[in-house]
Image: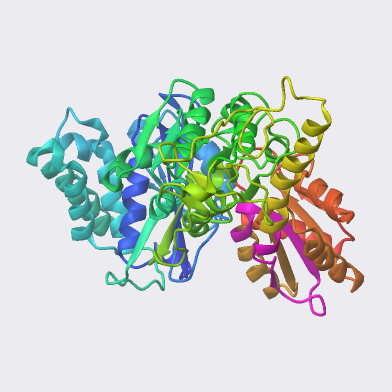
């Protein structure tokens, strides 16, 4: 085998089959095995909206250096089903790749692969049957054992992980899986050579393999989350599942509600009662939450809403990714009201954003919307040791003691210089007040019914509206300033403007681009509302005025962030690379767009 393969500095594996084959299980085991071996890992899943059948895959990219994007090509394909050749091998493999498959389970007699790709007929099914005829899915563990042999990983480490996974099913099941791993490992050692690579292993590294959804949930727990509600909706469900499992350990109450309307109202009510509160959904569920978002802003209740976008409109492609919900977030609920919209930029960033969002919600007494997407939420990465003390919990003007006599009657919506009023929780002596969705005066008394239209009420309306919106100005002043990564305007060939989850992909592409003589910079937008119009506008015009190409890169059809930037700054984007097919964007795809923009006069 080594005669056909060059020595690699990084490796990529894809396990593919259909729903019900245990593809995600073997993918996760192999990913964690690589992570515990000290390697940097990027793992991503692809699946269809079907319980059984269809086509699913788990892609793994490993290296000693950081890997923050999917691999451009597959080195080794573990093909469990015949569809793997059409869906995975042909578009994702090139000369030097290896396909490992069991011909006895395929209807395809002459599988087609790109020229130079090696086929290895691996009797995984028969080996599994030799161990236990009634447990067909054991062939997954046989494949896992083979993969350990391919890359010279630690077989004992794999068997230890299998023991942890299957111990609840009893010693017999653990032993069957150990035997299956041994069988795959020994067959490959006897019949094939390992794939040559320069990877080094270090099992002493302190790192964790975690997904974007889980990192966001974990960060919220570390940030003092006390209440969380959700209704299952792909791809946001893992946030609720993670919190359901680990939340009770920290005292967080997690509720699965009957629909998204109740999810949102429960979250608002919990926040009003004093809990650090949040909820999660995707675009369709978020559509049902919009009235509650405005309600939270009116009563100045601090809630975090997580929106993990998928391909729309309507049901769309529920298991595919897209950055298509920005306009929905910007337009959620009626009228003008304060709220923050922040885009998660990566897996590790999601951990810290979960804490930051809770702080902003509490300090400014407003809803905070976190914009994520299926790609970010459902891909996994190796993360170094997290800093649990980086972001201290800040609750703002939060009163839990009785209101002094000289400060009564308490004014919940008191006019203040920064627009933020002291907030009490129900039950505080002397803190009684009205809280409703109608406009109100400083005490909370409604002005929307019998007082509406009277001169006094008109004055109150203006005061309260200006008070609430003042919080946006204060927040804007306190946000971290936007930073350009990569080359300066005096040195760059191209400035890539992106937002949210695109950051890490752009970073990877910039590293490759410089080897091709392209000096790239990246402005990745994280803080969407309030928007840093002055700073962003200055950056864009500075690069443009110095002759640098500016490329807008988004995962939607209309360039929603580009239009938002134009509306806030007046800057017009000439060059755009927009993707809306639902698939993960590979580094080579973006690199091609960057090269076209630099060398061929731009993109439309």
Looking at the image, residue 369 sits to the left or right of residue 157; the answer is right
Whether residue 283 is situated above or below residue 515 in the rendered picture: above
Residue 571, position in %: x, y?
88, 56
Whether residue 95 is situated above or below residue 287 in the rendered picture: below
Does residue 154 appear in this view?
yes
Coloring scheme of the render? Answer: rainbow
Q: Residue at x 25, y 45 (%)?
A: 142
Residue farthest to the front, as pictured: 406
Of 171 and 436, nearer the camera is 436
Looking at the image, residue 77 sits to the left or right of residue 319; the answer is left
Q: Is residue 480 magenta?
A: yes
Specify the segment rendered in magenta.
476-504
Residue farthest to the bottom, as pictured: 490
Looking at the image, residue 251 sits to the left or right of residue 367; the answer is left
Q: Residue at x 49, y 37 (%)?
A: 272
Whether residue 412 is situated above or below residue 399 in the rendered picture: above
Residue 325, position in %: x, y?
67, 37
Of 303 and 17, nearer the camera is 303
Whether residue 145 is situated above or below residue 194 in the rendered picture: above
Does residue 99 appear in this view?
no
Quarter of the image with the N terminus is bottom left
Residue 455, position in %: x, y?
84, 31
Q: So how many labels did they put on this image?
A: 0
Residue farthest to the left, as pictured: 171
Q: Is residue 347 magenta?
A: no
Q: Residue at x 39, y 50 (%)?
A: 221
Residue 125, position in %: x, y?
26, 36
């Amino acid at each position: 085998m080594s005669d056909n393969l060059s020595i690699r500095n990084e490796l990529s594996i894809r396990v593919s089959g259909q729903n019900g084959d245990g593809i995600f299980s073997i993918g996760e085991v192999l990913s964690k095995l690589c992570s515990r071996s000290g390697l940097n890992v990027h793992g991503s899943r692809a699946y269809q909206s079907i319980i059984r059948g269809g086509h699913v895959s788990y892609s793994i990219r490993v290296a000693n250096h950081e890997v923050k994007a999917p691999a451009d090509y597959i080195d080794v394909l573990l093909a469990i089903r015949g569809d793997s050749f059409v869906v995975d091998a042909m578009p994702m493999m090139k000369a030097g790749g290896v396909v490992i498959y069991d011909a006895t389970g395929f209807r395809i007699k002459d599988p087609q692969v790109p020229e130079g790709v090696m086929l290895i007929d691996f009797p995984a099914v028969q080996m599994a049957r030799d161990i236990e005829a009634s447990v067909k899915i054991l062939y997954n563990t046989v494949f896992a054992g083979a993969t350990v042999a391919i890359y010279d990983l630690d077989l004992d480490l794999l068997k230890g992980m299998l023991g942890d996974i299957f111990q609840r099913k009893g010693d017999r099941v653990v032993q069957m899986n150990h035997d299956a791993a041994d069988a795959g490992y020994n067959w490959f050692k006897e019949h094939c050579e390992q794939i040559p690579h320069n990877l080094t292993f270090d099992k002493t590294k302190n790192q964790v393999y975690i997904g974007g959804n889980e990192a966001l949930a974990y960060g919220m727990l570390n940030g003092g989350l006390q209440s969380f509600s959700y209704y299952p909706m792909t791809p946001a469900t893992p946030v609720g599942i993670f919190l359901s499992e680990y939340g009770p350990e920290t005292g967080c109450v997690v509720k699965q509600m009957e629909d998204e309307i109740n999810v949102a109202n429960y979250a608002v009510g919990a926040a009003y009662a004093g809990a650090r509160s949040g909820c999660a959904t995707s675009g369709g569920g978020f559509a049902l939450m919009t009235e509650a978002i405005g309600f939270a802003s009116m009563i100045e209740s601090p809630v975090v809403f997580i929106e993990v976008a998928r391909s729309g409109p309507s049901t769309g492609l529920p298991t595919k990714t897209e950055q298509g919900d920005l306009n929905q977030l910007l337009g959620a609920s009626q009228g003008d009201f304060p709220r923050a919209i922040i885009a998660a930029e990566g897996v590790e960033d999601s951990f810290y954003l979960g804490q930051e969002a809770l702080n902003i919600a509490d300090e400014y007494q407003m809803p905070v919307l976190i914009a994520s997407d299926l790609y970010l939420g459902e891909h996994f990465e190796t993360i170094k040791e997290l800093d649990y003390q980086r972001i201290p919990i800040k609750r703002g003007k939060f009163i839990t003691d009785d209101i002094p006599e000289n400060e009564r009657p308490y004014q919940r919506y008191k006019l203040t210089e920064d627009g933020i009023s002291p907030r009490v929780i129900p039950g505080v002596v002397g803190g009684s007040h009205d809280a409703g969705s109608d406009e109100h005066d400083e005490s909370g008394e409604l002005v929307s019914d019998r007082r509406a239209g009277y001169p006094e009420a008109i004055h109150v309306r203006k005061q309260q509206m200006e008070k609430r919106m003042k919080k946006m100005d204060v927040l804007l002043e306190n946000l971290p300033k936007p930073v350009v990564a990569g080359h300066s305007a005096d040195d760059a060939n191209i400035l890539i403007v992106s937002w949210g989850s695109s950051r890490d992909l752009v970073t990877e592409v910039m590293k490759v681009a410089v080897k091709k003589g392209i000096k790239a910079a990246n402005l990745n937008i994280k803080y969407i509302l309030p928007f840093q119009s002055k700073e962003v506008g200055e950056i864009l015009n500075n690069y443009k005025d110095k002759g640098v190409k500016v490329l807008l890169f988004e995962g939607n059809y209309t360039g929603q962030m580009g239009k938002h930037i134009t509306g806030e700054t007046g800057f017009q984007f000439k060059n755009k690379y927009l993707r809306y097919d639902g698939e993960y964007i590979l580094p080579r795809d973006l690199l091609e767009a960057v090269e076209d923009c630099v060398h061929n006069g731009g993109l439309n």
